[in-house]
Image (cartoon, grey):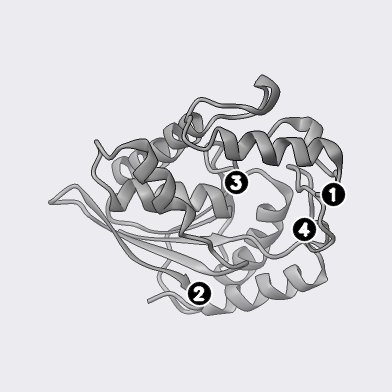
Amino acid sequence: MKLFVVRHGSTDAHAQGLRQGPGTPLGEKGRLQAKTVAEKFRGLSIDKLYSSDMVRTMQTADAISEVLGLSITVHPQAHELLKNPILNGIERANTEYQQFEIESKANELNPNWKFKSEGESSREVMARAEFVLSDFSSNHPEDNIVLVSHNIFMSYLAALVCLPKDAPYDIFNFFRRTLNSANCSIMQFDYDKKLNKWTLMGFNLSEPR
């Protein structure tokens, strides 16, 4: 199996320094990025197209769907880390957001931390990423899949694949933070059914390999 994980296109909200939420749409630049990356898959043998349920990923997946002629299947576990809803849509200069940044840094080695006890913890995102990898390897061991997802979630997928299962959380957290995917870049994984093993083949790719 080949798994191509595409980060969604850029949004005006992010460019304007606002916190993105589940309903944040692509901006004009993001829509062009989506069309560009979609063309990279033209002519490839892709069996399934998945997307997180957030608006910006679904819009990116729409462009890929048009090129591949595949319908989009929403994967409910592939969405971005859900932060406390009070942060959605606020400016990064906002006092509330500044407090979040301070507390987030202070708790970066606590996998169970949530800002004001709401949203998702790192541990919960890790569990979702593990589920997605297990789901694909169990149900699509020989298929080629495109999944449209998010930067943070993609970093969890990569860390789970690249690091030992018993890696300390501080190592896991440090490693995943080094993996920042550009908008509409591709993170590619291969899965070997015989070995039951995932391999990260590349990230920030401009086209599938």
* First-in-chain label (2 vs 1): 2
Q: Given the image, on which type of amino acid does mark 3 rest?
A: Ser
Query: Mark 4–mark 1 contact, CB under 8 Å?
Result: no
Q: Which mark is residue 14?
A: 4
Q: Are marks 1 and 3 in contact (CB under 8 Å)?
A: no
Mark 4 burial class by Cα count in 10 Å: few <14, some 14-19, many 20+: some
| Residue at disc 3, secondary structure | loop
Label 2's element?
A: loop
Of marks 4 and 3, the one in the foreground = 4
> Marks 4 and 3: CB-CB under 8 Å?
no
Q: Which residue is mark 1?
A: 93
Amino acid type of the residue tagged 4 in the rendering: His
Helix, strand or loop at mark 4:
helix
Q: Position of residue 54 (x, y in %)?
A: 69, 45
Query: Circle 2 is placed at which residue position?
Result: 41
Q: Residues within 10 Å of mark 3 (few under 14, many from 20)?
A: many
Discs 3, 2 touching: Cβ within 8 Å: no
Question: Which mark's residue is nearer the viewer, 3 or 2?
Answer: 3
Q: Earlier in the sequence, mark 4 or mark 2?
A: 4
Q: Which mark is residue 33?
A: none
The alpha-carbon separation of the residues under discs 3 and 2 comes to 19 Å
Q: Specify the quadrant that holds the N terminus.
A: bottom left
Q: Quarter-wise, where is residue 173 in the image?
A: top left
Q: Identify the residue position indicated by label 3 in the image.
A: 52
